Image: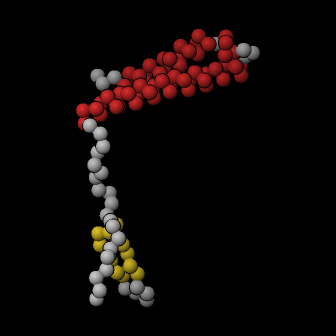
Amino acid sequence: MSEMRMPKGVRKITVVQGDSATVVFDKAGGGKKKKKGTKGLKLARKSLRRMAKAAQTVSTELVDRMDRSDEKKKDGWVKDAPKNVFKATKKGLKEMRKALPI
């Protein structure tokens, strides 16, 4: 029998006999991938991502609150601005606390 070349990533081939021959490929997968990045910078990266997420939370929450205030009252976003900014910032600070490595 001639030698067959297997595609990359195939560990084994199982041939199931029946009315018609069926070939099943078992691909190698699920192995650990090599981590990219320096271990020492992992904490810094995680903290920075959480701070960015907190900033995003503040802006998203503020826009949502402004829209709700504007729907309720005429020029509601202006009237409720201090309260909305305070509450959105409060929510963002809760997210920011998670960013601290302590």
Q: Position of residue 92 (x, y in %)?
A: 47, 21
Q: Residue at x 50, y 17 (%)?
A: 89
- For the C terminus, the image quarter is top left
Relative horizontal placement of residue 10, taking residue 60 as reference (left or right): left
Left of 77 or right of it: where is 21? left
Identity of the residue drawn at 66% across and 16% down? 77
Q: Quadrant of residue 47?
A: top left
Residue 54 lies in quadrant: top left
As drawn, is 58 to the left or to the right of 14? right
Rendered location of residue 15, percent (x, y)? 34, 81
Residue located 58% across and 16% down the image:
84
At which x and y percent is residue 70? Answer: 70, 19
Q: Give left or right: position of 68 versus 48.
A: right
- As drawn, 92 above or below 21: above
In this rendering, the answer to whether 64 lies above or below 76 is: below
Q: Quadrant of the N terminus?
A: bottom left
Residue closest to the eye, 35 or 57? 35
When asked about the image quadrant of residue 43, the answer is top left
Give the color scheme: rainbow, by chain, secondary structure or one colour. Answer: secondary structure
Q: How many marks?
A: 0
- In this view, the residue in front, 49 or 82, is 49
Residue at image point 48% right, 24% down:
55
